[in-house]
Image: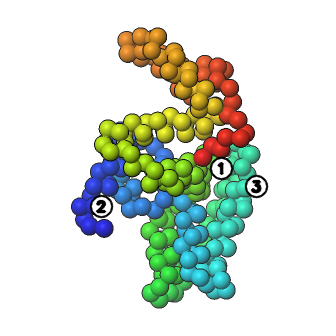
Amino acid sequence: MTFSDKKHRFEVAETFLKGFQGLLHCDGYSVYQKLEDVQLQTCWAHVRRKFLETNDSNGQGAVGVHYCDQLFKLERQWKDLSPEERLQQRQLESKPLLKEFWGWLDALVTMKGPLQKAVDYTQKLRDSLQRFLTDGRLFISNNLAERSIRPVTVGRKNWYFSTSVAGAHANTIGYSVIQTAKENGIDPFEYLTVLFTELPQLNIFQDSEQWENYFPWSPYIQAKVKPLSKHIKRA
């Protein structure tokens, strides 16, 4: 990748997240590290993958995988807890486990190769990998977001009919609306039907507060649109 490619990709992320301040789940892609006013929670699934790619099932690579597995095992136990309760458990159990993990990683002596790459990748993201210890709402992986975009990435060759930037932009809006409806537990077809039926009848641009009633998480939409069918996957 050339310098201009990297610059362009940073500009895309910077433009998309312009004005956003807060917490962001992401992978270890370097452009996210340059964003201002954003607190990153990077992904332990990616860390696990790096250690798995060492193909070292009986050595230090396996130790790294085991630490990651322990973190995910704890998170599965707490999936039904409130954010406050989850944060408390993380302080009690995940924090000591991470302290042990970083101690092991700091003491690890490696040479060039997959294991060194795994160590370098993990150390580079050290602060953002443990942000979940400060907020019970955070996830320790980026899997939810990646599952949500998988239908698009798997079928990307089918999207070549977007022969213009405007067409690609329109497709992006459509996919975002559909996925957001799914994530809020409502049927996307029913939701779009309500939008297309009711929004043209409203003075939405003169009374912008009416938009609030048509977001997929609003009480009005939640009551009006039927729930997502169990046969429809969220991602």
* Residue 110 to residue 162: above or below: below
From where the camera sits, is residue 177 visible? Answer: yes
Q: Foreground mark, 1 or 3?
A: 3
Amino acid of disc 3: Gln
Element at label 1: helix
Near-viewer residue (67 or 90) = 67
At numbered mark 3, what does the secondary structure look like: helix, strand or loop?
helix
Comparing 219 with 177, the one in front is 177
- The Cα atoms of the two marked residues, 2 and 3, are separated by 39 Å
Residue depicted at 65% across the width and 71% down the height:
67
Which one is closest to the eye, mark 2 or mark 3? Answer: 2
Q: Give how far across and how far down residue 199 sits, in percent.
A: 47, 17
Three-letter code for the amino acid on which mark 2 is drawn: Lys
Label 2 crowd (10 A; few <14 / some 14-19 / many >=20): few
Q: Name the mark on residue 87.
A: 1
Q: Is residue 60 above or below residue 157?
A: below
Q: Which quadrant is the N terminus positioned in?
A: bottom left
**Disc ID at residue 6:** 2
Neighbourhood count class around disc 3 (C-alpha, 10 Å): few under 14, some 14–19, many 20 upward: few
Q: Can residue 40 be seen in this view?
A: no
Q: Name the residue under label 3.
A: 77
